[in-house]
């Protein structure tokens, strides 16, 4: 029995509008991407692109140089990763303000015009310009602005002949049937080639530090269901998005090295884990469960025969409801970890993949720094009973209680200082200074400042108050000494 994946193209998304990796780090992870099953990159350059002329002001402080961009492309080609550049021409912010300009308002007052028509006209203009300048290019567009536009309006716009929609959904509970219905709608409008977009990180919380691997694996399981149940050969591939910020004004979410285990699990699930191609054995359920193919209860969804699809005697099975054991072993091998538990937020352990030291140290900080400081300040009976905020403001403490609080606080501060120093060194190998400063200030500094504040207040409270000056004589006796 052989396996096949319905996604011929598997693009890893690099979101460079936050925590852009150094080229030296990309040179380490590109071979891993290829080994895990990726064959493409979607690079969202944002302000890391070396813009020239009037656009130079868009450059970030540490933007890649032209030679570095050339090196990224060379490394991608070396690792058989096709590169698709992502350039924002009409993003969510623009959509929010669509039709707010005075000219647009006047245009919209005409009965036959609408926001949908305005959006489609812009897409048509941009896509036409791209194709005129680069005839061999195929523009891809996120599909959220297309979903609610009526079919006849989409068909009449000419857009289906110019672009290929990317259907995106990052949920673990993705509605398979609605996605299949949407694919049918797009096909009827004239879109013949479609793409899917999942997420391996950056989709479960703006300030998320550790990716919930189970969530992302389930998201890919659902997309596999869509791929094998929808129209044949319609989905050209899948983009595994790894958002680094929700937008330019939001905080950083999971760093790329921290998301590698999730990416590995998702890619390997797409390539090896969920699709079984072969004849329908009468004892398949028993066979797979006995051989330990799945750890979780087995659920099989029968894919009915379709035009151009497999016959009743050569059927496509979708195996879902669990993370295949052999896929888990593959992922552990690629990452150099002893155990990967997708049910946890993240698996602790060193590993040997590029950035594994960052992954391990960030895990320690995210899971234990804040909780350890909270435990000392909010649940230590000596702190809550004898050095409360009331006492700290007035610098009052029984001298004996200092010995119950200060050594533990100093020990905790020392341990975290050492770990944070290790993390800084590791981050410097992969990221630029502004990324390191931002991540530490958001995720480390608040707890460290609370701990340092406690020790500072202890020091001030333990300092003996200066003796008051001796009282002067209240009266003069008039006598000489």
Image (cartoon, helix red, strand yellow):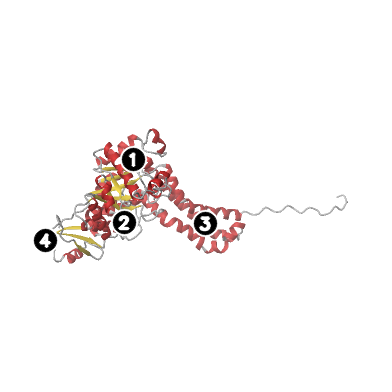
| Residue identified by numbered label 2 | 216
Q: Earlier in the sequence, mark 1 or mark 4?
A: 1
Decide which of 229, 38 is in the foreground and name it.
229
- SS category of the residue bearing label 2: helix
Q: Nearer the viewer, mark 2 or mark 3?
A: 2
- Asked whether the beta carbons under mark 1 and mark 4 sit within 8 Å of each other, the answer is no
Cα separation, mark 4 vs mark 3, equals 73 Å
Q: Earlier in the sequence, mark 4 or mark 2?
A: 2
Q: Position of residue 167 (x, y in %)?
A: 29, 52
Cα separation, mark 1 vs mark 3, equals 44 Å
| Residue identified by numbered label 3 | 407
Which residue is depicted at the point 33% across and 34% down?
A: 67
Q: Can the viewer see residue 328? A: no
Q: Position of residue 391 (x, y in %)?
A: 60, 60
| Residue identified by numbered label 4 | 313
The numbered disc on residue 23 is 1
Which residue is depicted at the point 64% across and 54% down?
A: 464
Of all residues, the one furthest to the top in this rendering is 53
Q: Earlier in the sequence, mark 4 or mark 3?
A: 4
Bin the neighbour count of mark 1 within 10 Å (Cα to Cα): few under 14, some 14-19, many 20 and up. Answer: some
Q: Position of residue 459 (x, y in %)?
A: 58, 53
Bin the neighbour count of mark 3 within 10 Å (Cα to Cα): few under 14, some 14-19, many 20 and up. Answer: few
Name the image quarter holding residue 21: top left
Bin the neighbour count of mark 2 within 10 Å (Cα to Cα): few under 14, some 14-19, many 20 and up. Answer: many
Q: Nearer the viewer, mark 4 or mark 2?
A: 4
Bin the neighbour count of mark 4 within 10 Å (Cα to Cα): few under 14, some 14-19, many 20 and up. Answer: few
């Amino acid at each position: 029995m052989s396996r096949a994946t319905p996604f011929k193209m598997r693009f890893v998304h690099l979101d460079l509008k936050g925590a852009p990796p150094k080229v030296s780090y990309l040179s380490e992870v590109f071979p891993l991407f290829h080994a895990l099953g990726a064959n493409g990159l979607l690079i969202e350059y944002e302000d890391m692109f070396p813009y020239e002329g009037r656009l130079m002001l868009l450059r970030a402080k540490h933007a890649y140089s032209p030679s570095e961009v050339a090196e990224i492309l060379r490394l991608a080609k070396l690792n058989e990763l096709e590169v698709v550049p992502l350039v924002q021409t009409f993003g969510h912010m623009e959509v929010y303000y669509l039709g707010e300009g005075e000219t647009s308002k006047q245009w919209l007052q005409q009965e036959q015009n609408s926001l949908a028509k305005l959006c489609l006209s812009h897409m048509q203009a941009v896509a036409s310009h791209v194709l005129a300048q680069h005839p061999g290019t195929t523009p891809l567009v996120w599909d959220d602005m297309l979903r609610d536009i009526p079919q006849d309006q989409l068909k009449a716009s000419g857009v289906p002949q110019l672009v290929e929609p990317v259907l995106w959904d990052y949920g673990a509970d993705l509605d398979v049937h609605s996605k299949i219905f949407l694919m049918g709608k797009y096909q009827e409008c004239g879109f013949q080639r479609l793409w899917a977009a999942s997420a391996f990180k950056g989709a479960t919380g703006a300030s998320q530090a550790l990716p919930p691997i189970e969530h992302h694996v389930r998201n890919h399981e659902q997309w596999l269901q869509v791929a094998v149940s929808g129209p044949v050969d319609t989905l050209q591939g899948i983009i595994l998005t790894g958002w680094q910020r929700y937008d330019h004004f939001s905080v950083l979410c999971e760093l790329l090295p921290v998301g590698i285990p999730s990416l590995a699990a998702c890619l390997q699930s797409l390539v090896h884990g969920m699709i079984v191609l072969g004849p329908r054995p009468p004892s398949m359920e028993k066979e797979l469960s006995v051989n330990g193919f799945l750890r979780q209860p087995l659920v099989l969804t029968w894919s009915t025969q379709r035009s151009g699809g497999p016959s009743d005697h050569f059927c496509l099975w979708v195996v879902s409801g669990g993370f295949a054991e052999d896929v888990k072993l593959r992922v552990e091998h690629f990452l150099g970890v002893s155990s990967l538990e997708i049910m946890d937020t993240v698996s602790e352990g060193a590993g040997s993949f590029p950035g594994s030291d960052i992954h391990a140290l960030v895990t320690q900080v995210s899971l234990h720094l804040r909780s350890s400081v909270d435990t000392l300040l909010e649940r230590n009976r000596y702190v809550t009973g004898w050095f409360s905020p009331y006492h700290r403001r007035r610098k009052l403490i029984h001298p004996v209680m200092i010995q119950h609080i200060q050594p533990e606080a100093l020990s905790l501060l020392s341990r975290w200082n050492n770990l944070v120093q290790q993390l800084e060194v590791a981050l410097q190998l992969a990221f630029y200074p502004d990324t390191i400063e931002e991540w530490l200030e958001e995720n480390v500094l608040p707890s460290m400042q609370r701990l340092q504040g406690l020790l500072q207040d202890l020091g001030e409270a333990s300092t003996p108050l200066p003796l008051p000056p001796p009282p002067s004589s209240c009266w003069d006796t008039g006598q000489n000494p």
